[in-house]
Image (spheres, rainbow, N blue to C red):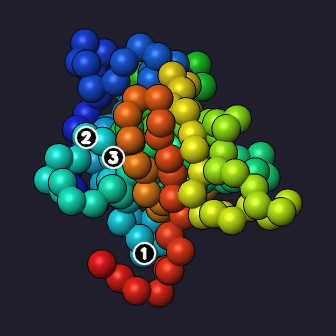
Amino acid sequence: MGSLERVWETWSLLSEKEREVVGAVSKMWVFKRAIVIGVEYQSFLYKRTTSRNNCTIIFQRHGKSHYGSIEKFVKCLEKCSRMQCLHEKCSCSLSVRYIALVRKLSRHPCQFPVYHGMQVVKHILRVTITDRVLAVPISYIKEKCMRIDVDPTRVYVCHTPNSFEKD
C-alpha cells in the first residue's frame, strides 16, 4: 500500500543490522503501510497519522504469540542461485517475500498484581523495548495492540478489549 522505495547498497533506508536480518536477496524495497487480511498496519516510517498507533502488533512465531513494533515493511526478491545467471541477465521466476522488520517487545517480569490468585487486569501487559529486530513475514501478523509509553522504563501493551466497534 503506498509507494515503494528501492534499497540500494549506498542508501541508508536499511541499517546494516536490518540488512542482515532480511538475509541474502537480489533486490529490496521499503514501504510504510500494508494491508494484512483487510486490516491496515503502519510502520514507524509513516508520519501522516499522529492520533493512532497502528504499528504495535501481536505476531505468531514458532507457535507462540509475541509483541513488537513495526519499524519498516520490506519487499524482497529472492536471489538467484544459478551459475549461468551470474554472467547473463536472469530470466528465472524468483519468489517475492513481504516482511515486517519488527522491534521485539519482551514481557517484563513485573506485571500488575494478582488478587486472590487471579489476574484482575488481563488485557494490559508491561513490556521492555529490546534492541532485537526480527524479520517477520506479514502473514504472521495476527492483530494490532496499543502501546503506552509512560516513561522509558514503563512501557505497556494493551489488547483491544472490544474488537467489534471501530474508531
Residue at left 18%, top 54%?
50
| Quadrant (top left/top right/bottom left/bottom right) for the N terminus | bottom left
Residue 128, picture quadrant: top right
Mark 1 residue type: Gly
Q: Nearer the viewer, mark 1 or mark 3?
A: 3
Residue 5: x percent and y percent? 22, 38
Mark 1 surroundings within 10 Å by alpha-carbon count, few (fewer than 14), some (14 through 19), many (20 or more): few
From the viewer's perspective, is residue 124 above or below residue 110?
below
Find disc 3 in the rendering and name its residue. Answer: 43
| Element type at mark 1 | loop
Find disc 1 in the rendering and name its residue. Answer: 38
Residue at left 25%, top 19%?
12
Find disc 2 in the rendering and name its residue. Answer: 45
| Quadrant (top left/top right/bottom left/bottom right) for the C terminus | bottom left
Mark 3 residue type: Ser
Answer whether residue 91 is visible to the viewer in this image: no
Residue 71: x percent and y percent? 38, 38
Numbered circle sitting on residue 115: none
| Element type at mark 3 | loop
Residue at left 53%, top 74%?
161
- Nearer to us in this view, 118 or 76: 118
Residue at left 70%, top 35%?
109
For marks 1 and 3, the one nearer the N-term is 1
